[in-house]
Image (tube, helix red, strand yellow):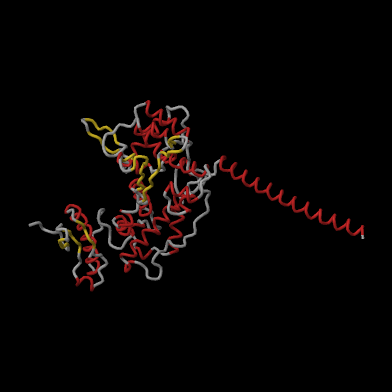
Amino acid sequence: MIELPRHVIPKKLASGTLAYYYNVPTKYRALKCPIMNEPLGTDFAKVTSRAKTLNEQFDEWDLARKGLPVSPGPIMPKYGTVDWLFREYKISKAYLEKVADRSKSDYEWAMQQICDIKTKSGDRIGGRPVKTITPRAADKLYDKFLVGTGKKLEGGRQRLRTGEKLIGLCRKAWRVVHRLFPDEFDKDVPNPWTGVTLKVRAKTVKPAVTRDEVYAFAWGAIDKGYPEAAATAVICFEWLQRPENVAGGHMTWADYRAPSAPSTIRVVHHKTGTIAPHPLEEPTDEGLVRFYADAEEVLAKLPRLGVAMILRDAGDGQAKLWRYSSLNHVVARLRKGIDGVPTHFTLDACRHGGLTELEEAELTDGQGRALSTHKTQKAYEGYAKRTAKRMLSATRKRHAHVLANEAATNVQNEQQNGVQNENRRAGKNS
């Protein structure tokens, strides 16, 4: 018989499958144990791993409750400290399910930056109890967040963007962990990071590339033996898929002209959980109109190595997913040797370029969001670049509006003048 981890109970589902649940004994609930019960699933390896983490949390709480010392080793931070808070955040659903894989390294760096800040007494912020971080302390820490070194910060320049990111991370981590462990926080000020006044900064606009630049890169990459990089760039531009989702295998051959939808490419946006079925063609009286003929020509050069569209040949008949960072390095290397490709060409810039083209095509907000699957207008507008083409289009419309108003005013004035003249003539005749 399998030995279950502590506090884990099995239950047989209606389907006959055995599922496992983490269940803290009732006597500890009476003592206000903050460790929540939760379903652990049916995969015993994952059950064991998660139960180990939850039991470590339980043991920390139990030792602290008894007034016994909690080992503050490098893997087990002291219960109730800032180090502990960030560890709890990293194992929460808010982090595991909501933070993109490509962003987690940035989050790790940011949390380490915060915890390693030294106080006046020389100890780390990470070792301080969460309750000691007051609103005044948060303001002082923000000033420390702004300080950095390096060529980009010469002349007394501050890390304004980094400061914003660290404040946002602290605010979010405090909110998530406070919900799970309310007794470890100051009841009067549970989140000292709310309301921190941030310095105003001029926000940079992410680069976007044009259609001509995307296809110059695509055919150059194909010529150099990298059809995967070519197809990824085109998919990001034409169908607005996030590049990490393309590299992560969320774009499959089954999504492209499937027997059930032979004139559609189905784009699954893993981040938002939305699906966009982009039509590829439309029959008209003049004949069949293919909307993405150039893109499909690039896809035709892509070898079918497996279920996912973007795979790399690992040899011996094996195909593997690309690491997103590796694919980015390939793109950065290729762009240097292809004519017509700018230095700011990236997979992200391809997607931004596609979203910018939606705006230049003067689609309505609803039409643009239908293609991009952004859920809010604010999120969609964040990608709209103020290009010269958009500015010219807006200027034309504004100028036409002014001319129309002037024409209407002239007509009205002429009518009024005509009435006045008639009245004068009538007065003279009388």
Task: Kindly give the residue lying farthest to the front in the view shown.
Answer: 285
- Quadrant location, the C terminus: bottom right
Task: Kindly give the residue lying farthest to the top in the view shown.
Answer: 223
Residue at point 43%, 29% (across, down): 336
Left of 427 or right of it: where is 20? left
Residue at point 41%, 68% (across, down): 189
The image shows residue 389 at horizontal and vertical percentages of: 56, 40
Left of 294 or right of it: where is 258? left
Left of 39 or right of it: where is 399? right
Residue in the foreground of this view, choosing between 87 and 271: 271
The image shows residue 245 at horizontal and vertical percentages of: 34, 44
- Quadrant location, the N terminus: bottom left
Residue at point 29%, 36% (across, down): 311
Residue in the foreground of this view, choosing between 351 and 195: 351
The image shows residue 267 at horizontal and vertical percentages of: 36, 44
Image quadrant where residue 4 sits: bottom left
Residue at point 36%, 41% (across, down): 265
Identify whether 365 is placed above or below 286.
below
Image quadrant where residue 221 sits: top left
The image shows residue 159 at horizontal and vertical percentages of: 47, 49
Can residue 112 be seen in this snapshot?
no
Residue in the foreground of this view, choosing between 257 and 69: 257
